[in-house]
Image (cartoon, helix red, strand yellow):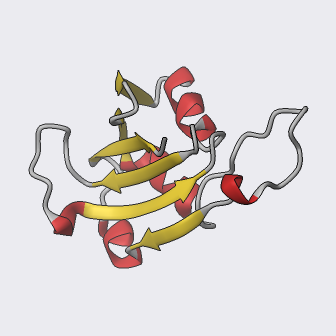
């Protein structure tokens, strides 16, 4: 496992994969899904698949987009691996601030996490 490629779009899982629906994407290390796990535990997101090709979640924009206000959500770091390894860094970040700002809080988003193995 090398990490994850995260893609957030303003569409339901059954919706079309239009480029205009894409809100953000980035690549992150192995510990980059903690924020999604936290949303699921809090009942604010649902995990639809967990195969890594992709791991798919849905959540309301009002619960996800505030986490992007300062950039990408923070990564979880196990106590035994506090060092900042290059492969764990967030990279290849793309966010469409206009689409994010225009997205209503009750919009269902699809979050795909693709295994980068």
Q: What residue is at 28 percent from the left and 63 percent from the top?
A: 22
* Relative image position of residue 89 (x, y in whole percent): 68, 59
Residue 18 x/y as whole percent: 13, 61
Tag count in the figure? Answer: 0
- 47 left or right of 82 in image: left
Which residue is found at the position 34% from the left and 36% from the top? 54
Coordinates of residue 47 in the picture (x, y in percent): 38, 25
The N terminus: image quadrant:
top right
Image point (26%, 54%), residue name: 10
Please say if 50 is above or below 65: above
Q: Is residue 54 left or right of residue 12?
A: right
User: Residue at the location (40% across, 63% down)?
Assistant: 24
Q: Residue furthest bottom?
A: 98
Which residue is the extreme one toward the front?
117
Q: Judge from the rendering whether residue 84 lies leftward or rightward of residue 91; answer left or right.
A: right
Q: Nearer the viewer, residue 91 or 104?
A: 91
**Percent x, y for residue 53?**
33, 35
């Amino acid at each position: 496992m090398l990490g994850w490629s995260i893609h957030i779009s303003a569409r339901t899982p059954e919706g079309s994969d239009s480029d205009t629906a894409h809100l953000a994407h980035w690549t992150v290390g192995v510990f980059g899904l903690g924020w999604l796990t936290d949303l699921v535990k809090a009942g604010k997101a649902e995990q639809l698949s967990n195969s890594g090709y992709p791991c798919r979640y849905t959540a309301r924009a009002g619960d996800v987009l505030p986490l992007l206000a300062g950039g990408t959500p923070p990564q979880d770091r196990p106590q035994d691996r506090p060092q900042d390894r290059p492969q764990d860094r967030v990279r290849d970040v793309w966010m469409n601030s206009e689409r994010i700002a225009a997205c209503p809080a009750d919009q269902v988003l699809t979050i795909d996490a693709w295994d980068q193995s």
